[in-house]
Every structure is written in C-alpha cells, then in structure tokens.
C-alpha cells in the first residue's frame, strides 16, 4: 500500500515482576519451565495488545505471550509456540503470529516474533514495497519486531512486514520477499 509511514519502532522493557505474571497467565503451571529472553512494550497500543514476552525452555521450545497493560496478564491462552519450523534455504529462520491491528489515532501496530539459528547475526524488517529495513530485537535465538505505522492514506490494509536475516559478514542470507515460508 502507498502512503504509509513507519512512525516508531521504539520499545521499552517490561519489568521482571510483570514478566513472571505474564508467563504464569500465558503458560499456567508450565511457566516455571520457561525463562524470558525478550520482554518489551510496543511503540503503540491496540485495544488488546501493547507488548510481548518471548520465553524459552531447556528443550529450546519458544513461546510468544502477548500482553496488555501493566497487569501482568496475557491474552495468549493457549500460548503461541514457535518450534522447529525453520524456513528458507538452510532452514535459518522461523517467524510466527505476525499481525497488524488498529491502534490509537490513525496508527496501526505491527508485531511479530520468531526464532533463528546461530548462522544469523542480524535480523531486520522491511514493510511493503519500502526497502528501508528496521532492526529487530534479538536475544538467545529469539527475535521480535514491532512498529507503529501511520496510514496508508487510502485505508487499505497495513503493509506486510518482511523478515531479512544477515550473517556475521553482513551478507543477506534470508529474504522473506524472495524465499518460501514453508519448510523445504
């Protein structure tokens, strides 16, 4: 879509106490088996979502728990698990539960998460046909991307986020726009 602008990709951390409550709300009795690797508030809030916690257990099973407010609860019940579906040539990256929802004013929240192999040193996100790439947050094999988007002016759907992965030498090794998103 034409006429959209990424107005912010700025996040803020979710405190440890709230993270523990979010994981308990999302995972129930299994929460003690997981530790958070990324826990952030998005740059803009929707009716239901303003943050996300990505956690992992000892079996390297990742879970995404979306959250709203500072109550320490998650509406992700059952939780969204991100497991062993690595895509692209060489199975380098997996992303799941990427969504866009209306936020306050004319803004839309774009949020998504996934995990990656050790071959990936940097992940960026581009939106729609705009080649500008914004850094994703990465930690312990997991990543999230989030952005506040204004527009598009014609009220068409928000631009699709595309994941790009780079190796340590700075070479792009995965581009969601050109590689399949199904396991090969």
Image (spheres, helix red, strand yellow):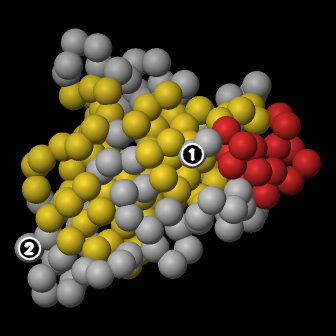
What's the residue at 50%, 63% (across, down)? 50
What's the residue at 57%, 45% (across, down)? 14
Mark on residue 3?
2
What's the residue at 76%, 35% (across, down)? 34
Q: Is residue 95 visible?
A: no
What's the residue at 25%, 55% (across, down)? 8
Categorize mark 2 by other alpha carbons within 10 Å: few (<14), some (14-19), many (20+): few
Real-space CA distance between mark 1 and mark 2, rounded to the nearest whole angstrom: 32 Å
Number of labels in the image equals: 2
Q: Is residue 149 left or right of residue 51?
A: left
Q: What element carries label 2?
A: loop
Categorize mark 1 by other alpha carbons within 10 Å: few (<14), some (14-19), many (20+): some
Q: Which of 80 and 10 is in front in this view?
A: 10
Q: Is mark 1 on a helix, strand or loop?
A: loop
Q: Name the residue under label 1.
A: 14
Q: Is residue 158 left or right of residue 19?
A: left
In this view, the residue farthest toward the bottom is 154
Q: Is residue 74 above or below residue 125?
A: below
Disc 1 or 2, which lies upstream in sequence? 2
Q: In which quarter of the image is the N terminus?
A: bottom left
Q: In which quarter of the image is the C terminus?
A: top left
């Amino acid at each position: 879509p034409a006429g959209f602008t990424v107005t912010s990709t700025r996040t803020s951390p979710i405190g440890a106490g709230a993270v523990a409550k979010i994981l308990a709300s999302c995972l129930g009795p299994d929460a003690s088996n997981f530790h958070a690797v990324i826990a952030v508030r998005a740059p803009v809030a929707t009716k239901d979502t303003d943050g996300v916690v990505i956690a992992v257990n000892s079996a390297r099973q990742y879970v995404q728990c979306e959250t709203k407010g500072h109550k320490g609860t998650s509406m992700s019940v059952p939780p969204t698990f991100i497991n062993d579906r690595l895509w692209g040539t060489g199975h380098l990256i997996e992303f799941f539960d990427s969504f866009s929802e209306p936020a306050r004013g004319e803004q839309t929240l774009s949020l998504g998460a996934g995990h990656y192999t050790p071959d990936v040193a940097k992940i960026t996100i581009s939106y729609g046909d705009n080649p500008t790439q914004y850094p994703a947050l990465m930690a312990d094999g997991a990543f999230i991307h989030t952005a506040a988007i204004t527009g598009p002016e014609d009220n068409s759907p928000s631009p699709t986020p595309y994941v790009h992965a780079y190796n340590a030498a700075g070479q792009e090794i995965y581009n969601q726009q050109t590689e399949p998103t199904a396991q090969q």
